[in-house]
Amino acid sequence: MIGNFFKAFTVPEIRNKILAIAGLIIGFRLLATIPIPGVDLASLQQLFGSNQLLGFLNLFSGGGLSNLSIMMLGVGPYITATIIMQLLTMISPRIKEIYYESGAAGRAKFNQISRYLTVPLAALQGFGFLNLLRSQGVLPEMTAIGLIENIVIITAGSLVLTWIGELISEYKIGNGISIIIFAGIVAALPGTVRNLFATYSPELLQTYIVFALLAVVIIAGVVFVSEGERKVPVTYAKRVRGNKVYGGATSYLPLKVNQAGVIPIIFAISILLFPQFVAQIAALFSPDLSLTLQNWVNIVFNNQIIYILFYFLLVVVFTYFYTAITFNPEEISKSLQQSGGFVPGIRPGQPTTDFLKSTTGRITLFGAIFLGVVAVLPNIVQLFTGVQAFALGGTALLIVVAVALEIARQISSQLTVREYEGIGY
């Protein structure tokens, strides 16, 4: 992996891509340091220390929320818009047709609609979050004009960050949205380490050792599952054209144990944050209703047992959901049949589709359960140790490892293509 990274810098095209992505990330980090006016830092730190969901939202913002920067919403609104659009593919034939049957043009239109939907979602989330901060004394009371100005600023910040993420994705070295979250976590790492040393005491030595071992287990487990795959053998029938014989080769179809990557974790956190924003947005209609909903949200999510079970369930469900969207057995079966390929012992057509569906379902079950366990394991440790940072640290570690593996895989793929094309290093 490290060798491929250094090799990538010897290929001008890949090196330029990496440097361009680095420049975009630096620009994002500079924007994330610009705060909105009137922030009470002491109240802000106290609020973050008592609300785990805000810590998760800080992951989406790439660290921009911790100082209430103009990028405080991060890519959260765009992720929410994507979830809504992908859910609509299950109930709207028209949107499903756009996503699945219209090719690259359909996917581009699908993404464009998601971007349009991001604007009102960012505005609503901005209002909800600003209302929460005002109620907690983090921000001073604002006039209607001041509130609207701040909503416009942070909505624009979220859209700019979404645009940066899409620019990164175009370089085909990892997913841009995931890389933004990855960059925010890595940028916060020195501060996290400093805080751990600042709060260290001999009584917590055993707890820190357990956490270090847990981090190693998470890294090893994520690497093992991310690289794991079921190789389905595929044989291509022989075809005679003139005096030449084509086909007859045997290959395999790699089915990943975890085809969804880190996306289920990101989606699950987004859903966990949604009730918090609904409670704050309700203030538009009734302050009493908003207060009641906020109390219910606090009661439910402050119960660690309920929170862990709900988080685990969401990760498992979204693993299946995202795998079903990104992996289409019918299309693969049709492609194999058109190219003269077949799975030994399985007839082409519908039997092959059914076989791929059942095989994918079985291996995804293991991947989903594993991903869910890894996601909530730090929360379980936090439940017994009482150290709040462990829960957030586990999720952040999971995202960092998964994104790093995806980046390494993309770089390796581009290097392999250039080897086949005869381009030397």
Image (spheres, rainbow, N blue to C red):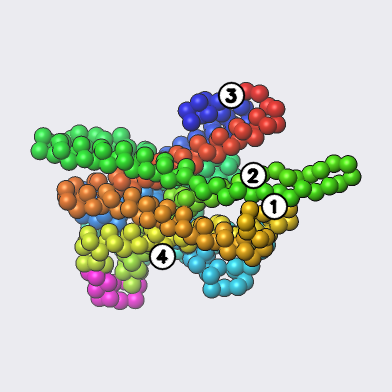
Disc sitting over residue 10 in the figure: 3
Do tag 1 and tag 3 residues touch (Cβ < 8 Å)? no
Q: Quadrant of the C terminus?
A: top right
**Of all residues shown, which one is farthest toward the left?**
203
What residue does disc 2 label?
251
Q: Give the magenta-colored segment's residue range.
A: 283-296
x then y, percent, for residue 393: 29, 45
Do tag 3 and tag 4 residues touch (Cβ < 8 Å)? no
Q: CA distance from mark 3 to mark 2?
A: 32 Å
**Of all residues shown, which one is farthest toward the right?**
242
Disc sitting over residue 341 in the figure: 1
Asked if residue 108 lies left or right of residue 18, the reply is right
Disc 1 residue type (three-letter): Gly
Disc sitting over residue 124 in the figure: 4
Sooner in the amino-acid sequence: mark 1 or mark 3? 3
Disc 2 residue type (three-letter): Ser
Sooner in the amino-acid sequence: mark 2 or mark 1? 2
